[in-house]
Image (spheres, grey):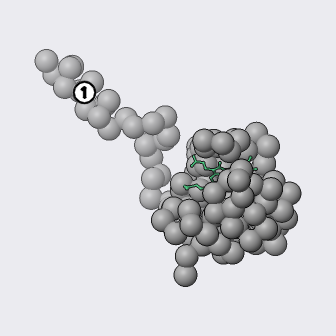
Amino acid sequence: MRTALVLLLAVACGGDDTTPTDTTTGDTGTTTDGPQTKEERILARIADGNVDIGSGQSVYSGRCRGCHGTDGQGSNQGPALTDRLADATVEEVVQVVLDGGDGMRAYRDVLTNPEIADVTAFVFDAYGPE
Ligand code: HEC
């Protein structure tokens, strides 16, 4: 019985395969080198402001503009970002760029982490709310 309880606790607290120690390092600008998913690395860059809007604009022009329009107004191939970003989170946008959507391809293996961070920052900057 005691063994079962210990096992249960271990499972309950185990979470992912990330190291259970040192979870208090989420401060600021640290270039994290712990185990992180690609999405987490991208989100950390954005949260740290470690993005280049100009580079994001180049990525957008090269990869996204054809469907989402020169001014984010959309086309018959993709929705207007000016509409979509009004209630999308940064996480959702990174997710759709990584994994694609209904009619949009995945860029996980096409763009680098900095490129995805940059283009996400650019679309929010250029077409996001407020
Ligand atoms: C082939 C056309 C096409 C290209 C190229 C394309 N998209 Fe999309 N995109 C779409 C379509 C279609 C949707 C709607 C998908 C859905 O709702 O699941 C979409 C949805 C989105 C959304 C909305 C996500 C949300 O939460 O509502 C964002 C943001 C976005 N695309 C950004 C980009 C960026 C950034 C690029 C370039 C890296 C890009 N798209 C390239 C067609 C495209």
Q: Position of residue 83 (x, y in %)?
A: 56, 66
Res 124 visible: no
Disc 1 on helix, strand or loop?
A: helix
Depth check, front residue: 4 or 80: 80
Q: Position of residue 15 (x, y in %)?
A: 39, 37
Q: Is residue 106 left or right of residue 1?
A: right
Q: Residues within 10 Å of mark 1 (few under 14, many from 20)?
A: few
Mark 1 C-beta to ligand 1 under 8 Å: no
Q: Residue at x 63, y 64 (%)?
A: 81
Q: Is residue 96 above or below residue 114?
A: above
Q: Is residue 38 above or below residue 73?
A: above
Residue that numbered label 1 is attached to = 8
Q: Position of residue 14 (x, y in %)?
A: 37, 35
Q: Is residue 28 above or below residue 94?
A: below
Q: What amino acid is at disc 1?
A: Leu
Q: Position of residue 55 (x, y in %)?
A: 82, 67
Q: Is residue 10 left or right of residue 51?
A: left
Depth check, front residue: 27 or 64: 64
Q: Which of the 4 image quadrants contains residue 82?
A: bottom right
Q: Residue at x 27, y 24 (%)?
A: 7
Quadrant for the C terminus in the image: bottom right
